[in-house]
Amino acid sequence: MGEEPSDAVSQDLLEEMVCFDLHAASRAMTAVYRPLLEPLGLTYPQYLVLTVLWERGPQPIGAIVERLEMDYGTISPLVKRLESHGLVRRVRSAQDERQVEVALTDDGDRLRAEAPRIRAAITEALGLTARQAEELHRVLRRVTARARGGAAD
């Protein structure tokens, strides 16, 4: 026979776990992005790669890995998929011919025009004021830094 949980122990263990709320929020955010990105033929992780290239220009895969805090095994297939869709290409670095960078194609650069519409739709979906969004960013960055063992601001 199974034991009944003690009354002294909360019955809502998941409700007490901040990590579960972060996990659920992450999945929910990806679901909010999906209908915005599907018409563009993009997944959320692919959109993140394009965003890095829009903000920084051509980048080695290692720089994309670092900026998105993902691993090579995740980023490399994303780049290959974007390349097969004609949105990025691999080019030799202008500074070091030995290094290969990922660069936007004209089609990839044209998608940048969709970014403000997508950001506006996400902002509306979240229903946060600018101040609340700023506070959420601050808290999430602090949680991330602390979880990595670093100092929080």
Image: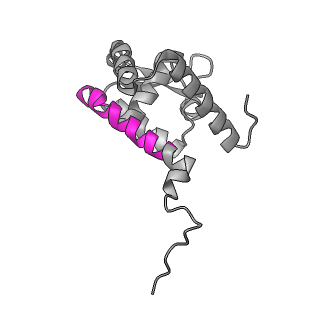
Q: Nearer the viewer, residue 86 or 139?
A: 139
How is this picture coloured? Answer: one colour
Overall secondary structure of the magenta section: helix
Q: Is residue 32 visible?
A: yes
Q: Toward which corner of the image does residue 34 lie, by quadrant?
A: top left
- Residue reaching furthest to the bottom: 1
Q: Residue at x 55, y 68 (%)?
A: 7
Q: Quadrant of the N terminus?
A: bottom left
Expressed as whole percent of the image width and height from the top left, the position of residue 32 reads: 34, 33
Chain part drawn in magenta: 22-42
Q: How many marks?
A: 0
Q: Is residue 29 located in the magenta-colored stretch of the structure?
A: yes
Expressed as whole percent of the image width and height from the top left, the position of residue 3 reads: 50, 80
Q: Is residue 20 located in the magenta-colored stretch of the structure?
A: no
Q: Nearer the viewer, residue 81 or 48?
A: 48
Q: Residue at x 42, y 35 (%)?
A: 45
Expressed as whole percent of the image width and height from the top left, the position of residue 55 reads: 51, 16
Q: Is residue 104 above or below residue 11?
A: above
- Residue reaching furthest to the left: 39
